[in-house]
Image (cartoon, coloured by chain):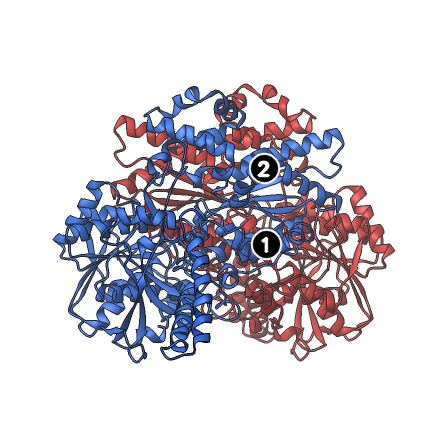
Chain colours: A blue, B red
Amino acid sequence: MDSDYGVPRELSDLQKQRTLYQPELPPCLQGTTVRVEFGDATTAADPASAHVIGQNFPHTYGQPLAHFLRATAKVPDAQIITEHPAIRVGVVFSGRQSPGGHNVIWGLYDAIKAHNRNSTLLGFVGGTEGLFAQKTLEITDDILSTYKNQGGYDLLGRTKDQIRTTEQVNAAMTACQALKLDGLVIIGGVTSNTDAAQLAETFAESQCSTKVVGVPVTLNGDLKNQFVETNVGFDTICKVNSQLISNVCTDALSAEKYYYFIRLMGRKASHVALECTLQSHPNMVILGEEVAASKLTIFDITKQICDAVQARAEKDKHHGVILIPEGLVESIPELYALLQEIHGLHLQGVSAENISSQLSPWASALFEFLPPFLRRQLLLHPESDDSAQLSQIETEKLLAQLVDKEMNKRLKEGTYKGKKFNAICHFFGYQARGSLPSKFDCDYAYVLGHVCYHILAARLNGYMATITNLKNPVNKWRCGAAPITAMMTVKRWSRGPAASLIGKPAVHPATVELKGKAFELLRHNASSFLMDDIYRNLGPLQFDGPGADAKTITLCVEDQDYMGRIKLLQEYLEKVKSIVKPGCSQDVLKAALSAMASVTDVLSVMASPTFSSQPRL
Amino acid sequence: MDSDYGVPRELSDLQKQRTLYQPELPPCLQGTTVRVEFGDATTAADPASAHVIGQNFPHTYGQPLAHFLRATAKVPDAQIITEHPAIRVGVVFSGRQSPGGHNVIWGLYDAIKAHNRNSTLLGFVGGTEGLFAQKTLEITDDILSTYKNQGGYDLLGRTKDQIRTTEQVNAAMTACQALKLDGLVIIGGVTSNTDAAQLAETFAESQCSTKVVGVPVTLNGDLKNQFVETNVGFDTICKVNSQLISNVCTDALSAEKYYYFIRLMGRKASHVALECTLQSHPNMVILGEEVAASKLTIFDITKQICDAVQARAEKDKHHGVILIPEGLVESIPELYALLQEIHGLHLQGVSAENISSQLSPWASALFEFLPPFLRRQLLLHPESDDSAQLSQIETEKLLAQLVDKEMNKRLKEGTYKGKKFNAICHFFGYQARGSLPSKFDCDYAYVLGHVCYHILAARLNGYMATITNLKNPVNKWRCGAAPITAMMTVKRWSRGPAASLIGKPAVHPATVELKGKAFELLRHNASSFLMDDIYRNLGPLQFDGPGADAKTITLCVEDQDYMGRIKLLQEYLEKVKSIVKPGCSQDVLKAALSAMASVTDVLSVMASPTFSSQPRL
């Protein structure tokens, strides 16, 4: 850990200009008074999990939603928080850096100071390790000045990604107590927010007065559910990756001799790959979710790509661009099973060089079939969330090699008559992760920082800051907070070492919804993307002019606005009440009873644990 | 070759906006009349080469410089070209695509049509192969509409990179004659412009009436000399690469656990790596020119990096970013010698799998020492310019592995006490090459296209379009043309198969000048870059606002303005003449004679073939 945290950075002209950008606040957060309206008690989306989650989180499960409204909003039940005593808040980066992270801290700082100049914001330096070791840096205007709207996590740094063991949880609690923190804000993704929920529960149980708040910041875009529409960083990452993918497409079309296999950082889910495909229109994308649903083997995928190469060659096209999510390797059944065996042996303490000799016969056969570079990568120690070291496993190279082999075979057999197949492989991740955040991510993160303050001012514990209606301009955004436990599911089956996670509630990692609108859009265009080279170059991320305010296609087409629909439902229920007041006609009452009886019947069935074990979130 | 050339592309919002951007013309090219002033006859920079070049290019060597001036310019000798008969011009992309290429065609088209609506511009589709096969596409307003200010070469495509064999030269001549071309414009780098000069000479000798013009378009930035300050594409490539390098630096500083080894596309010379270093301030750059000058072996370089890693670890820094030009492998003496042996065996027809057994003992020992992936890459067939397939040779991985091994050794021996060394490798090239061109490249290419027309209107043959004073705004740019032969040198020694090039004049490929100002700037900051992590994030390429008009640091600090200094010299000479007019005093005449005698003495010595065999260009 070096001592450079918080030092002013040398900035380029563009960086300097970006430090001057001031994100707008939605009307509900403007001014110094904010109303909080509490909704109904929350449940988990999967009825079958609800009971287990409730048992695991007795103090923090079932808390109500909170909505933040402007002080003048005419909502009878809403309470205005008028007291703003000086508070002490800690903030920590947890997990992979994601563009926009710094703005959460800036927004939180501005909100804290706007309500009481004597409040204090402490940043933990070096991630959760800094939290355990109580290493802090007091955030000031001066310190923030060269980090506003800037990428990276270098203001505070980050190291280890978890707060999970009893030792870690206790160290975190000791730190919060020693530093007399009223609140602890954890900036991170699925895993970090699961840890935040656990910490909140433990604090509540131990009557530690620090309230824990989570913020959805992850480039993977997989912290999505009823309450969370997208994550800080996802917009930027998809735009920078799309810029590079588009450039490679233009290159492919100019040189007409290469197939580019591009693997994209984004963990297990394929959200980044899907969004980039919708933006740049490469020829193919192999989504992990599709592969898993169809149980495609590595040979099926190879054949699919080879058939595409052959079909294109028949149209005299000998170039192309194929996207691969980094999590694909875990979606391919036989590779996943092999990885599970390897991880099991790791857990038993078998050293990497001895693992191959202890594999089962079938796993051993597959292992030996794989090229040496991939074998080495599969043997790497698994990550803290039990997944393989996805960033290090070059699935794109494996596929390129297998396709090359198969195309040569077809060429020899005479079934393929095109030019020699040539592949170039890329992994795009690190070069996007440190990017200056897009305007959307700057705004989203900054406003989330403000929301964190209001959650703490309302003394809520175990909540995540949420903003909905994001596809609309900032002045239409709705701010709120949802208990993290309401976003959880319980893993019910797993093989190998991940079996230890069975029965443990965790924030549900969203995968690409194969029935969703974004995927539908892809399917609708897939054959045209494949054959017609309708590449589209998004260009470099702009901060002014056309495209500067564009949002991800996924966000725009999904149009979930769950919170808006919850409100609409409440309005319907109120309307029924107001029509069927005592004194209404028998006919009206009869019709209402009959209609409501059938509605409640249907809903009871749908919400029962047996109806669906993995609900669509 | 597919049939998609010239079809309208689907454009993103930003692309659409860019098609509306209209580059400005410098005053000398505005309006419909342009004056041409011819300068003195040119020579080659290396006096020792001049004779050989003259022998090889009897028709095109020694032609005068041409300057294009505004019609109202008060230059007595300049001639105004008043006749603009309808002409037919062909244009072809040759060599690696470079951002801005499309704008040369657009500028040329606009200039041709502005002077005579009946003139015709034919694009050869599929590069030089299209030229040989006479496959053309007539350029129209409609066709250009979705390609203005866009990246790639996909309007016309490109395939083979050379016009060199007698067969190829004859095919090109036949095409020009069959299509009745008044001019042929070749868009490319060092090799393509050498071919252009050869073609011009052959056409002149054969009394073919087509005039050949070259345009300096190459992302490598190595077509630099007295007349050419920079190349179309270099600005964009350096900006996009710097964006990505900066992002990786931010990432390194946030995670603090990786060393990133980044190899940069740019052929043999290290111009791209140097510019990106000056922009982004990574910790280290290994310039090929420095390695060659100091004759550093691969082990010397490894040691240099290991010592840096160790020094940083002592300051508790376990991360860093190291840049490597793709041409480095040819600058390392022992690897270059090995490559030469391999290429020699290739030329003898030895197949790749048999090469290793026929190497000399020392080469074989080195070959066996190298990791298998690198051996495979070294065995690839050399490129058309006799260099290795630099884009395919992963020197960054070799260095990362060697450093890893050495750091582990030092760790075991106890001489290194830091954390375990972790490397991540990247190759940046294809993802930058297809980028939307920067404003500078859009302007530079568009104006060069105009200059090409004026060269053809003046009936000049074997010239390259030139623009100088580029670091200043467009309205200060000076437009001209220089004989390509004046940019040539003759290779005097070489080992292995490249020996066949000995004695053949070729456009001089500029390497990074170790006595130049850009390198001086690097040296001045190197220790601070290494230790202080003063990373600077250039951010994504902007088309508006701060940074949109920035130019490369290399261009700005080099400040060559050779053409301006030639003009200044002429003014001094005129002044001497005007002072020492017949009738002046004996004293004045005596002083002038004495001074001029010593000046001419010094210059004669400096310009003699023996003074320097490799002059600074």
Q: Amino acid at mark 2?
A: Ala
In this image, A339 relative to A144: left or right?
Answer: right
In this image, A437 relative to B581: left or right?
Answer: left
Q: Which residue is mark 2?
A: A400
Farthest-out residue, right = B178
The residue lying toward the viewer, choosing from A456 and A261, is A456
In this image, A580 relative to B147: left or right?
Answer: left
The residue lying toward the viewer, choosing from A233 and B565, is A233
The residue lying toward the viewer, choosing from B34 and A298, is A298
- Please tell me whether residue A85 is drawn above or below residue B465 in the rendered image: below
Respond whether the residues carrying marks 1 and 2 are from the same subunit: yes
Q: Which residue is mark 1?
A: A522
Which residue does the image show at 39% across and 50% down from the upper left? Answer: A46
The location of residue B6, given as percent across then percent down, is 73, 59
Residue B602, can we see it? no
The location of residue B585, given as percent across then percent down, is 54, 74
